Image (cartoon, rainbow, N blue to C red):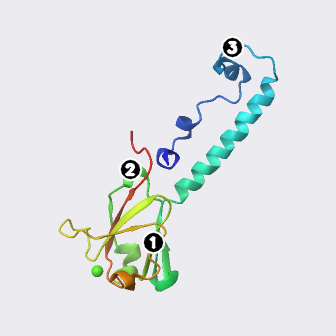
Amino acid sequence: MALRTGGNLSNIIPFNFDSPDSIKGELPGGEFSSSPLTLAMLFKSFALLLATFAASALADSAVFYCTDINWGGNCHHSPPITADQQGVCHNMKGDVAQFNDAISSFGPDGDLSCTVFKDFDCPSTDSGFQIVHPGWADLRTVGLNDVISSYQCYIEQGNCCG
Ligand SMILES: [Ca+2]
C-alpha cells in the first residue's frame, strides 16, 4: 500500500482546493460549465477521505506484544515503524526490558513483516523467525515462548522510499 509509506500528503493529493480555477485547468478541454464549487467540494471530500485513510494506515504500522498468550498480561504497542525505520533492530532493553525473554504473543500490525530473535541485536548468525499480521497469539506453538530478545520489521507491501 503506497499510502502507508509516503507520509507526505502533498504527494498524494496534488490539488489546490482553495482555488476552483486550478481545478478547471486540470480538466481536458479547459473550460467546463458545471459549477466549479461543487466539483471542488467533491474533490475536497475525497481528499479528506484519503487523508483519513492514510493517517489510519500509518498509525497501524506498529508491533504489539504481550507477556501472556492470547494478548494477555503486560502488553506493549510499539511506536509506528515508518519507512525509514525498516530493518532497524529493536532490543528488549531500556523501557521495554521487562519484555525480554518474557513475550508469549507477538503481532505486527498492517503490512509489517517482522523477524524475531532469541538474542539481542538481531544477530545475522541467526535467521530468526518471521512473523506477519496478525501474528502469533501463542508463541509456545512455534517454540518461542519467553525467549525473544530483539526484532526487526520491514514494510512488506508498498512502493517504499522511491
Ligand atoms: Ca532471549
Dot 2 alpha-carbon crowd within 10 angstroms: few under 14, some 14 to 19, many 20 or more? few
Question: Which amino acid, by three-letter code, is at mark 2?
Answer: Asp
Q: Nearer the viewer, mark 3 or mark 2?
A: 3
Q: Which residue is mark 3?
A: 30
Left or right: residue 144 versus residue 44 is left
Q: Position of residue 115 (x, y in %)?
A: 33, 67
Instruction: Tell me how far mark 1 sits from mark 3, CA to CA.
Output: 51 Å
Residue at 50 percent across and 60 percent down: it is 110
Residue at 22 percent across and 68 percent down: it is 123
* Vertical order, 150 against 103 (above or below): above
Question: Which amino acid, by three-letter code, is at mark 3?
Answer: Gly
Disc 3 secondary structure class: loop
User: Answer yes or no: do the residues labelled 1 and 3 have beta carbons within 8 Å?
Assistant: no
Dot 3 alpha-carbon crowd within 10 angstroms: few under 14, some 14 to 19, many 20 or more? few
Q: Is mark 3 within 8 Å of ligand 1?
A: no
Front residue of 43/29: it is 29
Q: Which residue is mark 1?
A: 135
Q: Is mark 1 within 8 Å of ligand 1?
A: no
Q: Quadrant of ligand 1?
A: bottom left
Instruction: Tell me how far mark 2 sits from mark 1, CA to CA.
Output: 22 Å
Quadrant in the picture for residue 124: bottom left
Disc 2 secondary structure class: helix
Q: Which mark sits nearer the N-terminus, 2 or 1?
A: 2
- Which mark, by number, is residue 84? 2
Q: Position of residue 31 (x, y in %)?
A: 73, 13
Q: Residue furthest front?
A: 141
Front residue of 137/55: it is 137
Q: Which mark sits nearer the N-terminus, 3 or 2?
A: 3
Quadrant in the picture for residue 116: bottom left
Front residue of 112/9: it is 112
* Vertical order, 74 against 86 (above or below): below
Residue at 43 percent across and 44 percent down: it is 159
